[in-house]
Amino acid sequence: MKTSVFKIFGYCTMALLVHTMSSCKEVNPKEQPVEILDDHTLNRRANATISDSLLRQVYVPIYSDIYNQTRDTRTLLTATLSIRNTSIRDSLFVSKIDYYNTQGDLVRSYLDAPIYLKPMETIDYVIEQQDTSGGSGANFIIDWYSKKKLNPLFQAVMVGGLGAQAFSFTTEGVEVEQE
C-alpha cells in the first residue's frame, strides 16, 4: 500500500513539474523589450489660440500617500490622473497640467504648449508609488478649453496595498475660479 501511494505521489509530482516547465515561456535573447510611448507627448500640439472667455480651470485632488494607523505611518500609493474627452464630435484642448504638493508648491508642469484630445480620447498621467514629492494633499491644476460646450471628465485613481490587502479609490475634479 505504501509503495502505491509513493508511486502516485511521484507521478503527480512529475506531471506537475512537466506541466510547469512546458507552460513557461522561453526568453529569446534576440527579443528586445517593447518601448511604450505616451501618445499625448507625440505630435499632439494644438494650434488653436486660446480665448480667455473659453478657458476653464479644474482642481483634481491626488493622494500619493495616506496615513495608516498613526500620523507617522504612511502608505505609498500609485495615482493616475485621467483626462477624458466625453464628446463624440469635438476636440478638447488642454493648455496646462501642473502638479502641486501638500504645501502648495509646484512640483512639475507636464505641458510646455497646449495639446488636444480627439473626440472620445483619454490621456493619463501616473504618479509612481515611490514618488513622494506630492504627499497626502497633492493635486493637479488643469486649464482646458474647447470650441463648443463640452463636459470632459477629470478623475484620479489611487491604488495601494496594506499587507495582502489591495485597495483603490477615485477622486473627481472640480471647476475653480481662474486667477
Image (cartoon, rainbow, N blue to C red):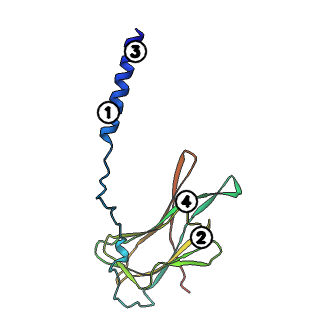
Q: Which residue is tagged 1?
A: 18
Q: Nearer the viewer, residue 17 or 95?
A: 17
Is residue 152 depicted above or below 34 in this figure? Answer: below
* Residue at mark 4 to residue at mark 2: CA–CA distance: 12 Å
Between discs 4 and 1, the one toward the N terminus:
1
Label number found at residue 133:
2
Per the image, label 4 sits on a secondary structure element best described as loop
Is residue 75 depicted above or below 5 in this figure? Answer: below
What is the quadrant of the C terminus in the image? bottom right
* Residue at mark 2 to residue at mark 3: CA–CA distance: 59 Å
Q: Position of residue 102 (x, y in %)?
A: 63, 71
Per the image, label 2 sits on a secondary structure element best described as loop
* Residue at mark 3 to residue at mark 4: CA–CA distance: 49 Å
Q: Is residue 141 left or right of residue 27?
A: right
Between discs 4 and 2, the one toward the N terminus:
4
Q: Position of residue 58 (x, y in %)?
A: 50, 76
Q: Nearer the viewer, residue 173 or 48?
A: 48
Per the image, label 3 sits on a secondary structure element best described as helix
Q: Which residue is found at the position 54% from the left and 55% from the top?
A: 160
Per the image, label 1 sits on a secondary structure element best described as helix
What is the quadrant of the N terminus in the image? top left
Q: Which residue is tagged 4?
A: 77
The quadrant where residue 100 appears: bottom right
Q: Is residue 102 left or right of residue 109?
A: right
Neighbour class for label 1 at 10 Å: few (<14), some, many (≥20)?
Answer: few
Between discs 3 and 1, the one toward the N terminus:
3
Is residue 112 depicted above or below 139 in this figure? Answer: below
* Residue at mark 3 to residue at mark 1: CA–CA distance: 20 Å
* Closer to viewer: mark 3 or mark 4: 3
